[in-house]
Amino acid sequence: MGVLEIKGLYKYYGKKCALKNVNLTGDFGEIVGLFGPNGSGKTTLLKLIVGFLRPSSGSIRVDGKDIDHNTRAIVSFLPDNNLLPSWMTIKDAFNFYKDFFPGFEEKRFKDLIDYFNLSMNRKVKELSKGEQEKVCLSLTISRKAKIYLLDEPLGGIDPASRERILTGILKNYREDSLMIISTHLISDVESIADRVIFISQGEILLNEKTEKIREEKKMSVDELFRKTF
Amino acid sequence: MVDFDERIPIYLQIMDLIKKKIIKGDLKGGDKLPSVRELAVELKVNPNTVQRVYQELEREGIIVIVRGTGAFVVSDEKKLKEIKESLAGERIKNFIKEMKEINLSKEDLDLLLSKYWEEVN
């Protein structure tokens, strides 16, 4: 049984259908790339998994249970927009997370902050966009969770930092968890993903192991994506 | 950082990488390979991909995996020769195919090989 099981999921915003009959499972030890154009439903899907949104119909089970107030304790979500208040220092944000989330790993976080060449006394408002992204990512992956959802963790980040972020993610990836990374830049994460999911207009078009795509179609995931969309 | 050809399964490319290291002597019999995690971070690939590489290399008898200790290169001269020949074999086949396409005979090739052998360093 997978740590994530989604069956017949629909999500409507008013009359607009944002997700249409989504069926998915995810296992421990997997890194899944969620790819799709802007507005395809990636963020909606992630927000449903963490319980920020409710399904219009269908079911989502996390670690064998329906989603409720306990789900957030085992799902760590990195939103695509920064949510840290600007008056905070990195240390404030760290203290907040440490108090709020049991099992938050202090050492892991401090090592990541060092690795990203940041320091705990920096103020959020004085950080660049990329630096804020690094702080948020560090907070998200230092939590102890069963599912990590990273929504566009590489959006608007320069190539050099991108590599550092990917390395940070890989170094801290836990085998006893599922990680879903959403992006529209496939080429950046295609080597680190076990499996890719292509989503377009709320529908899943493809859900396949990356090595199988290379083996059977003799093309890169990026090429396949360009051909599909 | 290694640039992978994303159109070819990455585990095959990493297997070749390790085999080349063994042939060149960068990795010797008895040497310990990096842990799955270490190699995944170093190459920026999925840990499961590295896991598969080690499994396949063990299946081919090139490494042994000792539970809880790590993966080690086997010391076996015969195996070494085998790896060398199979790595070379693939490339030579492709090379011959290209030469046949431009209508070179085996005799022509022998001459050309001798002629250029010394030039390439």
Image: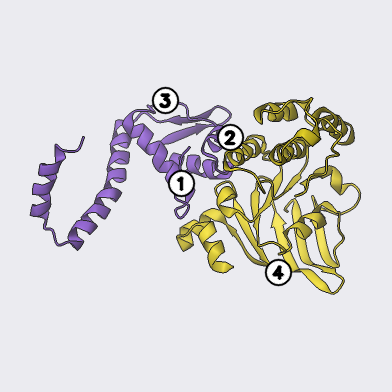
- Name the residue that disc number 1 marks: B4
Give the chain of mark 3: B
- Name the residue that disc number 3 marks: B30
| Sooner in the amino-acid sequence: mark 2 or mark 3 | 3
Chain A shade: yellow
- Name the residue that disc number 2 marks: B37
Q: How is the structure coloured here?
A: by chain
Q: Is residue A148 left or right of residue B11?
A: right
Residue B91 spot, x, y in % from top left = 28, 49
Q: Please tell me which residue is depicted at 63% across the width and 56% down the height of the picture.
A: A184
Give the residue type that dot 1 points to. Answer: Phe
Residues marked 1 and 3, same chain: yes
Instruction: Determine whether the residue tagged by mark 3 lies in a helix, strand or loop.
Output: loop
**Mark-to-mark CA distance, 2 and 3:** 20 Å
- Name the residue that disc number 4 marks: A201
Density class for disc 4 (Cα within 10 Å; few <14, some 14-19, many ≥20) is some
Give the quadrant of the C terminus of chain A.
bottom right
Residue A36 spot, x, y in % from top left = 65, 61
Q: Quadrant of residue A117?
A: top right
Density class for disc 1 (Cα within 10 Å; few <14, some 14-19, many ≥20) is some
Residue A5 seen in this snapshot: yes
